[in-house]
Image: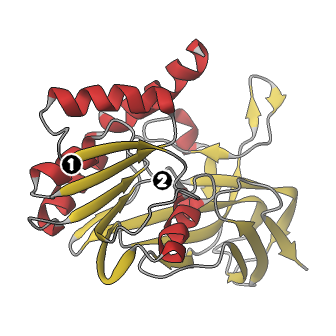
Amino acid sequence: MCDEAFSSIDIVHQCLIDESRTTAFARAIKKLVKKGDIVIDAGTGSGILALFAARAGAKKVIALENDDFVAEITKKIVADNGYEDIIDIKIGDARNFNFGKIKFDLVIMELLTTGMIDEYQLEANNNLHKQKVIKKSTIFIPSRVETFISLVNAQFDLYGFKMKMVKHLWNNLSENQKYDIISNEKALNLIKFNNRNKQIFKSLVSLKPKKNGKVNAILLRSKTYLSKGISLSDTETFNAPVIIPFEDEFVVEKNKNEKIKIQYEFGKGYQTFSTRKK
């Protein structure tokens, strides 16, 4: 229990002190929350986004957290700041939580990783649509996420060993420099949260190499749109670009298109993800 508690609250705290991420959400919430709104903050963590919504004038904020240890700390934080009558901390999984007959004016949901591959944003968002707890006028923060793809040659050698695995290129890591972009970048998908979306994504992407060379991975990056004029690419804890290795490397020729088959289920991690179509 101690190990689980430490790791979960540590991740929550890292997100909290990521100033670029947190202040961008704060600006969007202040801009879009209206007095009297009923708000859901799914995956509330520290409760900071719920607190922003309460401070902006929300009448009621349902702050949903799946980790009971984190939720207990968040209840204390909410009470310490005098918002316990507005913010209702609930413990549950946003992917299947039963919201009852409530209707939300605004949805805040930050369960995001690049391409929404690791976390459950899309499945949790679909649950809101399935339960019909949103209206045509419901506002979503963020409103949409766009993901881009390119071909790269990456180094997978560490400490004298071959370490072929998925790389998250968090800001300021030395790993960020250990790859060479080989092709153009192309939009892979655009997910809008005011719609219910398919859980499985499939695409055949054509990418044009900018030079001759070897390719052994793809690079994904995402851009998240919180509201009009407010967006985020990667920060210290948010949307780290991701390098995903191919099973085998291959040689490409400049300006000769390469077709890459992409298939994955949102929120289920990096199983069979991408293959070269010969």
| In the foreground, 93 or 237 | 93
Q: Is residue 140 left or right of residue 33?
A: right
Q: Quadrant of the C terminus?
A: bottom right
Residue 39 badge:
none
| In the foreground, 173 or 4 | 4
Residue at 28% in and 68% down? 106
Residue at 71% in and 66% down? 265
Quarter of the image for residue 105 reads bottom left
Q: Which residue matches tag 2?
A: 111
Q: Is residue 260 left or right of residue 29?
A: right
* Element assignment for label 1: helix
- Name of the residue lying farthest toward the top: 2
Q: Is residue 97 left or right of residue 34?
A: right
Q: Indicate whether 20 appears above or below 12.
A: below
Q: Which residue matches tag 1?
A: 23
Image x and y of residue 235, in percent: 37, 47
Q: How many marks?
A: 2
Residue at 62% in and 60% down? 219
Image x and y of residue 268, in percent: 71, 56
Residue at 29% in and 45% down? 88
| In the foreground, 149 or 153 | 149
* Element assignment for label 2: loop
